[in-house]
Amino acid sequence: MLHVGDAAPTVTLRPIFGLARSVPPAAGEGPLVLCFVRPFASPFSRAVMAAIQARYADFDRVGVQLMVVTRTDLAEARDFVPRYHVLAPVVVDVDGALHDRFGVGVDKGLVRSLAGLASPATVRTAVDALRHGHGRPHPRITQLGAQFVVGPDGRLAMVHYDRTIFERPDLDALLACASAL
């Protein structure tokens, strides 16, 4: 797992549509927010993508690039992005190499997710997620999300690993952190 202050893994992110972006950022590039989301077949990732889509302009307006990383199959992602008018660049990581480099894991056996299922917040999240479609079963159902803010210096300014499949990114906190860099 990575921590605030660590150097971000050196990678080149190649979105399915749009320009590649290097981590750490090249000289003169601003901060970068990376949102690792579950495969797009999940209603929970569809809800996350709807939230990202609704806030994407806020990031763009202050010069912060937000990129989505998913383990969705390439063909499915190429269909999903234009169908749902996703503006954020989407990087497909089918083999999980980026997930491994950033330490993004899975909820083994859904233990943490199922343990918190009875909480009112989780029930609200599940009901809201189902408003975005029921999705379909996916082989990576236990994949967790994570969020990172990479500063212009290549250091991680914010790190959050989801603990359950029901968590959503705190886009306000990500934007505030990245805007302050």
Image (tube, helix red, strand yellow):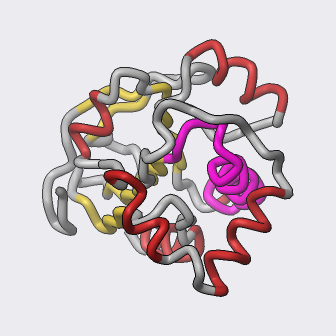
- Judge whether 83 appears above or below 129 on screen: above
Secondary structure predominantly adopted by residues drawn in magenta: helix
**Residue 26 appears anywhere in the view:** no
Q: Residue at 46% across / 66% down in the picture? A: 113
Q: Is residue 67 left or right of residue 162?
A: right
Report which quarter residue 23 is drawn in: top left
The image quadrant where one finds the C terminus is bottom left
Report which quarter residue 2 is drawn in: bottom left
- As drawn, the residue found furthest toward the top would be 75
Q: Residue at 30% across / 48% down in the picture? A: 105
Magenta range = 37-59
- Judge whether 153 appears above or below 68 on screen: below
- As drawn, the residue found furthest toward the bottom would be 120
> In the image, residue 17 lies at what x, y percent?
62, 21
Q: Residue at 74% across / 19% down in the picture? A: 79
> In the image, residue 122 lies at what x, y percent?
62, 76
Q: Residue at 40% across / 44% down in the picture? A: 29
The image quadrant where one finds the N terminus is bottom left
Choose between 89 and 81: the one closer to the eye: 81
> In the image, residue 121 lies at what x, y percent?
64, 83
Q: Is residue 21 left or right of residue 59?
A: left
> In the image, residue 33 lies at what x, y percent?
45, 53
Q: Is residue 136 left or right of residue 152?
A: right
**Residue 75 appears anywhere in the view:** yes
Choose between 96 and 27: the one closer to the eye: 96
Residue 77 among magenta residues:
no
Residue 54 among magenta residues:
yes
Choose between 121 and 172: the one closer to the eye: 121
**Image mark count:** 0
